[in-house]
Image (cartoon, helix red, strand yellow):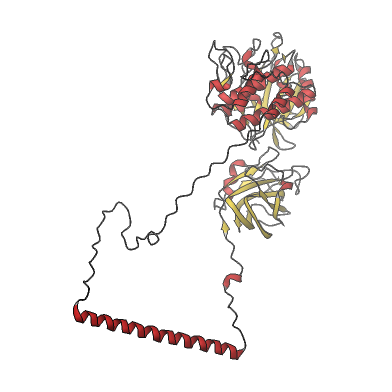
Amino acid sequence: MAERSTAAVDVADNSGDNPLTAKADAATTDGVAESIDTADTAEQGPGDTGGERKPTEPSIATPELHSGHKLARRYRLEECVTRLDGFSSWRAVDEKLRRAVGVHLLPADHPRARSVLAAARSSALLGDPRFVQVLDAVEENDLVYVVHEWLPDATELTALLALGPLEAHDAYQLVTQVSQAMAAAHREGLAHLRLTPGAVLRTSSGQYRIRGLAVNAALRGITSDTPQRTDTEAIGALLYASLTQRWPYASDAYGLHGLPKGVGLIAPDQVRAGVHRGLSELAMRALANDGATASRQEPACTTPDELVKAVSAMPRIRPPEPAFTAPPEYQRTTYQQGTYGRPPAGPHPTVTQVVQAPPPALQGRTGKAIKWAVSALLIAALGLGSWQLADSLLGHDKGSGESGTSQQPNKGDGDKPKAPVPLRIQGAEEYAPDGSPQDAGGVAKTYDGDSSTYWRTKSFYDGPAMAPSVKQGVGIVYDLGSSKNVSTASILLRYGGDHTKITLYAADSLSPSVPVGSMTKIATVTTNGTQAELKANKPVKAQYVLVWITAMPKAGGDQFSGAGYKQAITDVKFTG
């Protein structure tokens, strides 16, 4: 089952002066936390960046369902997270594929049932990975339900903004990815119409994904005569909020304070110091569609395509340079500092060393005689030493010439292979390129020195090879602190049997930006036991090492999961 993420608040109508009435933390249907939606009773105001709501519809009773109810003998409902206007949203489990999913439910005779089905099926056909994917849309037993992805590792933009405004590079990535995704959707005739901070998610890899394309608006009966303009203004509002941590309207919304009443729409760089000038102007061009108010009077952006072109015309904003801690200043030894024999500096009381005065020079005839005697002895000693040295050298050369052989230098121990050096692991993160981690919280247990603790995978029906029926693989990226030569790895496993396949790769970061197939392979091994020893043909220099499992043995059930193909790592050690 998916684990719950950080808390955030999203309500159905945050416009005007209506207070936020729902504050209970619960998981949203897309894998991040959200509270129960409040009722929509009025048309959306300027603070909600959505289209207009349809006229008030007669109240429809939400189907009485409970946790544990199954749909199509497959989707088991776990927790109701939204109940509003005759529909409900649930966190559920797909028992066939053993993964968490989200489910929207409403009666088949609901006035919006047809439009919800149509929106869900159209969104599913788009198949763009930048959107949370619709997995199923079914009408069955007087019920209409829509099943979609659950993203346990994603965080709502609402939660990110609660911590403060985004850095310029993060805001640039947000507007770039969201505008490109919405431009692609509009080219296929799909609009969002409810593109709020709660609808934008950022995954652990830094990618932004949009949930509820067409479906969220259909569930709430929201329409618009100018869908492209509506979504463009919504993107502008998201960018504005990301730069200033303020909602660009007079009313508070989505946990953000609105602008002061009576001042109108002011540029982000006038709201907060240090805002990137180009992004500030871009937000104004997307928001002020009745006439640009950006400082350079650039034309307004009225469609996502125009916004994409405006972003492309900007100079690219690069990520900030990583902050490196300056190494401590080199401390010379007391001998190098010329203080050998002096007391060490410190809080101890200093003691002045008494320097004895040299004895007075010898005076008179006796002193002169002693001086000459010492000089003569020194000259004799030098002469004797020189004669002995010359004799020794001549004898050595003679012996060498007579033997006719040259003495070869003795080979020292430098030619012997060096003993492997253990490489200390500084940190690690689970690598889940498909957005579905196995046990993200248990990664540190693989290098804590305790063989009784472990990181575990989920249990799968198919195996031992994971691809293509389950996924490409599962694994962990380890940080060695700095670039080091990696030659071997020793991995202790929890389950033995036929069979476990593990490959080591050199990654570019804890969250690799390239697929596994593009990484440098270090070593690979297949084992039926509980210990895997991997050895490279030659050491590979890397700071980040990916342990990638592509096959797992079959094991019995335990307190975490049922019987199936699974594996657990108890201990990982690298040497170089």
Give the left or right position of residue 272, taking residue 342 as reference: right
Query: How many labels were placed on the picture?
Result: 0
> Where in the figure is residue 18, as x and y percent of width and height?
57, 12
The single residue placed furthest to the bottom in the displayed view is 402
Q: Residue 94 appears in which quarter of the rendering?
A: top right
> Where in the figure is residue 318, as x and y percent of width and height?
63, 36
Closer to the camera, 60 or 352?
A: 352
The single residue placed furthest to the left in the displayed view is 364
Q: In which quarter of the image is the C terminus?
A: bottom right
> Where in the figure is residue 5, as x and y percent of width and height?
60, 32
- When the figure is inspected, residue 262 is found, relative to residue 449, above or below; the finding is above
Residue 63 visible in this rendered orientation of the protein: no
Residue 148 visible in this rendered orientation of the protein: yes
Q: In which quarter of the image is the N terminus?
A: top right
Give the left or right position of residue 241, taking residue 300 as reference: left
**Residue at position x 51%, y 89% from top?**
395
Closer to the camera, 331 or 550?
A: 331
Closer to the camera, 258 or 303?
A: 303
> Where in the figure is residue 99, as x and y percent of width and height?
70, 36
- When the figure is inspected, residue 573 is found, relative to residue 89, above or below; the finding is below
Give the left or right position of residue 448, taking residue 473 as reference: left
